[in-house]
Amino acid sequence: MAGDLVYAFRVMRLPLLDAGGSAIGRIEDIVIVPSRAGTAPRVVGYVATSQRRRIFVNASRFSTIDGEGARLRSWDVDLHPFKPKPGELLVGKDVLDKKIGDETVSDIAMRSTTDGRTTYWELAKVRLSRRSALRRRPSVRLVDWTEVPTLFGTGAPMAAEAASMRDMHPSDVAIIVRTLPMGQRKQLAEAMDDDRLADLLEELPEAEQLRIIEGLDLDRLVSVLDEMEYDDLADLLAEMPGEQRTRILDAMDEDDAAVMRQLLSYEEGTAGGLMTPEIIILGPTATVAEALAQIRDPDWLVSIAAQVFVVRPPYRPPTGTYLGVVHFQRLLREPPGTELGQCLEQEPTITPDIPDHEVAEKLASYNMLAVGVCDGAGHLLGAITVDDVLDRTLPTGWRQRRRSNSPALTGAGGVVNEGRPK
């Protein structure tokens, strides 16, 4: 699919490929939402058929979309049935074949765009066709999407607000959301993508998280929680009533649920409650090139991608014997074929039962972005990052004070700092 523009009609015929390039389904439709005033509607994901199910695949999950197919970054596929959210439009269902005066929308063209941090697809052009009694073939013209703005109206104002916040940092979104009445917060949550809502929840106190997700159906709730970092999710689950927590754990993927039950078993205020098992783990014979390939994955947090933990097999927590860590800067200095076992640094680790303040002292004493957590037998259980320690050790209410000290946040799709849509 060479060229600047990619047409929806072609994308909606492509095979869905797993990370290895094998076909596991087929793209059926494209999900778009309105964007901030003056900017193009954005592609948020794709509807695909896989294993006889109609599923949603977030646009960020794809590594490439070309003539061979739409290829996923990882092997994971969420097989929950697709349910359109308020404010979303399906290109095939809601856009194509629509009448604009005496013309008909026959196709739309998308363009890959970057904001310096992420690459995404947005709408660029609309192809309009007009039939005439004097011609056998319809006349066709290509117009900019701004010439047909009513085509992308959804009648869902909170969907536009959610789209307007798409490029904002989650902490800034949280500042705005905290000013909204609870009813509008819930409407906004309904309109947000799962990963974006998960990011927002991680920036709010657990009590406010519970109020926002109240009323979400179980499938949607599990999809959102699946996007949260393990340590943040453990904090949220710990605040839930026991019956609700059990229902959610039973609906989660078995492996994820097992991880969460383990994290919930640690006492409050200990390292185990701060720990995440989602870290980069490789063996001593893995190469620098393999480690750098892992670090390049944009889904990793910066603090996690700063180092690779090296262990004996197995390579999922609890791992085999922990051997050491290799930092990103060291990887950049070594030849690509060098084995990680030759680059190890012996940094201190901690056990999951030590108090929070000792974790902070350890990170500060050794100037680490993350510290490994091992059990008594030397098996790696996970790691704790400095950002999570700061979040836990800062005084209660620091997020609210940050809001009061922040400059007014205006221009985000009509949301002003008083929290009232224009």
Image (cartoon, rainbow, N blue to C red):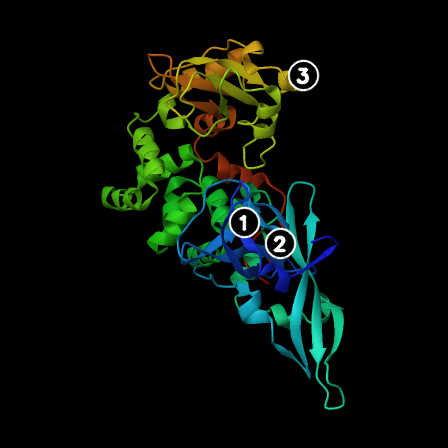
Q: Which mark is residue 416?
A: none
**Marks 3/1: CA distance?**
47 Å
> In what quadrant of the picture does the C terminus appear?
bottom right
Indicate whether 141 appears above or below 267. below
**In x, y percent, where is residue 188?**
48, 56
The answer to whether the residues at label 3 and label 1 have Cβ atoms under 8 Å apart is no
- Which residue is the extreme one toward the left? 243
Q: Secondary structure at mark 1?
A: helix
SS under mark 2: loop
The residue labelled by disc 1 is: 176
What type is the residue that disc 1 sits on? Ile
Q: Residues within 10 Å of mark 3 (few under 14, many from 20)?
A: few
Q: Which residue is identified by label 3?
A: 335
Residue designated by label 2: 412
- Disc 2 to disc 1: CB gap under 8 Å: yes
Q: Nearer the viewer, mark 3 or mark 1?
A: 3
Q: Position of residue 120 (x, y in %)?
A: 64, 49
Please indicate whether residue 300 sits to the left or right of residue 330 in the image.
left
Marks 2,3: beta carbons within 8 A: no
Residue 178 visible in rendering:
no
Q: Residue at x 69, y 68 (%)?
A: 126
Real-space CA distance between mark 2 and mark 3, rounded to the nearest whole angstrom = 46 Å
Query: In the picture, residue 52 is in which quadrant?
Result: bottom left
Q: Amino acid at mark 3?
A: Pro
Q: In this orientation, does residue 47 appear? A: yes
Q: Please name the residue shown 45% across and 46% down the image.
A: 77
Residue 149, horizontal then vertical, whole percent? 67, 70
